[in-house]
Amino acid sequence: MSAAKTTILQKLTAHTSDVTSLDFYGNALLVTGSSDKTVRVWRWVAGSGYREEPFSPLLGHRYGVTSVRVSPKGAVLASASVDGTVILWNLSNGQISNVINQEGGEAIRACIFSPNGSTIVSSDDSGSICIWGQDKSLKGHVKVHDEAVHTMAFSSDSDILLTACTLGNVRLYAVENDFAGDLSSADCSIDAAHDMGVLSADFCKIVHTDPTDKCSLIYTVATCGTDHYIKIWRIFFMPSNIDRSRRSRLIPTSPQEHFAGQSTIYSTEVMNASCVQTISAHGSSVTCVRFNPTGTLLFSCSLDKTIKIWNQQGTCLKTLSEHLRYVNCLAINSDSTVIASGSNDRTIVVWDLTSRLSVGSHITGIRSLLFSLAVKTSEIPLEFICPITHELMKDPVYAEDGFTYERSAIREWFSREKAVSPMTNLELSTDELVENGKLKQQIEDYMRSLDVESGAGMNNS
């Protein structure tokens, strides 16, 4: 990443007001929403770059669009608006398939699909969320905050919903089995996560299991806000299919209160949280944070007009400057080769992270073997991936916390912090590392098998 030059691939200038939201589906489809009340749909055409679909713009909202999201299977686009509606559009022809009205007609600030596609959730200025089933019926209307909810995020397994508000508070709910449980109170709360408001949050797709009990799940979440910071949190969760009376070093057996700097964390026997990094990220409010699909990089944008790219150690790898006004939103395509950013300057900038692309590229066929490997992270055994970098390990070592890390990554972590586990945030009695020779051999065997498969594929082509 650090070696490749990031270049501007394209500028899209169709919107006539602030660009408020973006989303990719795969590599070829980009959707954008704006305060100009429109939603626009762009599809990559080799030779032209992203070109607006014939049925775009999509007109149906009476006021500004605040959020656009493509469904997990790519057939439906949801757009939310200050007009109190979520409109569902057929992405094959741009026709409206459904209009969902927020309870009380409140202005909607965000909408999101659960990754399993079973639910749509919308949030509003009153601090409430509406939960809609696949048949678009209202499954729940819950007051989750005292102020407007500007951001929500689902874990990659659809089992946790995060909401956050303009007071700076975060709420986390176990929503297994399609919201079958009680949402009257949060399973974990973080008060004052960001001073003066949380503006964005995102879950990393990679989920780890605590090696000591082999049942507590560890999620990684990034949040950002008006305090100019990005914070990285570990969320510890005991799934409902596990006996929750079992002891865990990460999750208490009864509700507890603890602190992370200025933040107060209220945990339950279901869920706990800990802040593992606080990054002084930008010169003004941080408006959006997004992990790339493989979890190796974090992207942020700000009212300071810049986009930044971070590794999982909290090091800024690049700063991108092109927008003339506030940058409100960003999105990353499916193989992490392209990002798009939207701004109050009314433009969308499409950035090439590889320095190898042009508007003539066939972006669905540009993956090198390494990109193919990275995109198929779900096919790589999780134990081969470093919990810090989320990259395939070359020199795996045990630490006292029971996790195996890439040697250089855990050494860098210990050089910045006292001996604290990057995964549990618990203090360690030693920073000594022990080589995991067995795992190293397994990774080498795995890489050799990929080389064989790649060679066979080339011989057959």
Image (tube, helix red, strand yellow):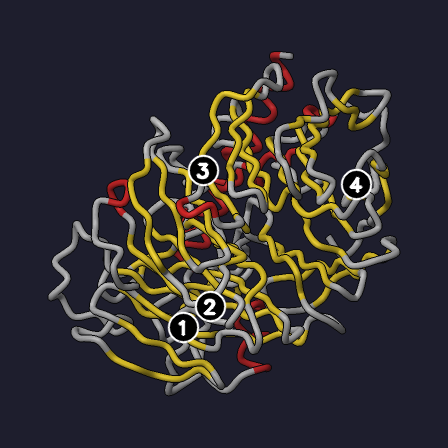
Label 3 vs label 4, nearer the camera: 3
Name the kind of residue labelled 3 in the image: Asn
Q: Residues within 10 Å of mark 2 (few under 14, many from 20)?
A: many
Counting residues from the start of the chain, the first of labels 4 and 2 encountered is 2
Name the kind of residue labelled 2 in the image: Trp
Q: How many marks?
A: 4
- For label 2, the SS is strand
Is there CB contact under 8 Å for labels 4 and 2? no
Is there CB contact under 8 Å for labels 2 and 1? yes
Task: Tell me the quarter of the picture where residue 173 sits.
Answer: bottom left
Alpha carbon separation for disc pair 2 and 1: 10 Å
Give the x, y percent position of residue 27: 66, 31
Label 1 vs label 3, nearer the camera: 3
Q: Is residue 457 above or below residue 124?
A: above
The residue indicated by pointer 2 is 233
Give the x, y percent position of residue 143: 35, 58
The foreground one among 411 and 138 is: 138
Alpha carbon separation for disc pair 3 and 2: 33 Å
Is residue 335 at least partly visible in the picture?
A: no
Which residue is found at the position 69% from the left and 69% from the top?
285
Alpha carbon separation for disc pair 1 and 3: 29 Å
- For label 1, the SS is strand
In the image, farthest residue toward the top: 460
The residue indicated by pointer 3 is 101
The residue indicated by pointer 4 is 350
The residue indicated by pointer 1 is 190
Which residue is found at the position 63% from the left and 15% from the top?
459
